[in-house]
Amino acid sequence: MKIAAITEDERTIRRHFGRAPYYLVVTVEEGKIIARELRKKAGHAEFAEAPHDPAPAGQPHGMGPGAESRHARMAQGISDCQVLLCGGMGLGAYESMRQRGIRPIVTDIEGIDEAVAAYLDGSIVDQVSRLH
């Protein structure tokens, strides 16, 4: 199983999905991390110059017509992962990951190793109240 976490420093989970520059992808076998790989993540810095359609009135963040293509680019780097750990994200990105078969989990656990352990033992809580 592969689990991705958004990060800047390879140790902690970044609080904002769109602004995180990297994914740390851990491979888990028999309940233990056996490999780590840092992958570049598409994000706000790359999309800043692209035109942005405003979100439809009354819709949550990331639900505008152009958002899906940006989310698809963000998901490309972790298409082999089953889980995505983050500290916060827009509802559009959350739903986009789910549609691609990646389970997003919004957590307040800061350490990547601690969050992976909590996922594996079933104690992690998906804090959907942190979606924006």
Image: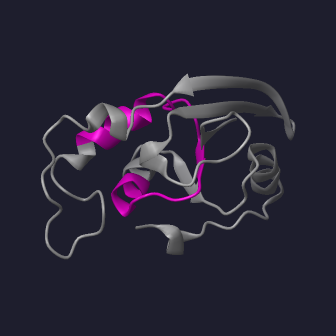
| Residue 75 on the magenta segment | yes
Frontmost residue, 64 versus 21: 21
Residue shown at 37% from the left, 50% from the top: 96
Quadrant showing the C terminus? bottom left
Q: Position of residue 87 (x, y in %)?
A: 58, 57
Residue shown at 64% from the left, 32% from the top: 24
Residue shown at 54% from the left, 32% from the top: 22
Left or right: 74, with 50 as reference point: right
Left or right: 89, with 92 as reference point: right
Task: Kindly indicate the quadrant of the structure image that contains residue 95.
Answer: bottom left
| Residue 36 on the magenta segment | no
Frontmost residue, 107 versus 84: 107
Task: Kindly indicate the quadrant of the structure image that contains residue 34.
Answer: top right
Q: Position of residue 5 (x, y in %)?
A: 62, 42
Quadrant showing the N terminus? top right
Q: Position of residue 29 (x, y in %)?
A: 82, 32
Decide: is 118 above or below 29: below
Colour scheme in the image? one colour
Q: Position of residue 64 (x, y in %)?
A: 19, 56
Residue shown at 29% from the left, 57% from the top: 62
Decide: is 54 above or below 25: below
Residue range highlighted in magenta:
69-95
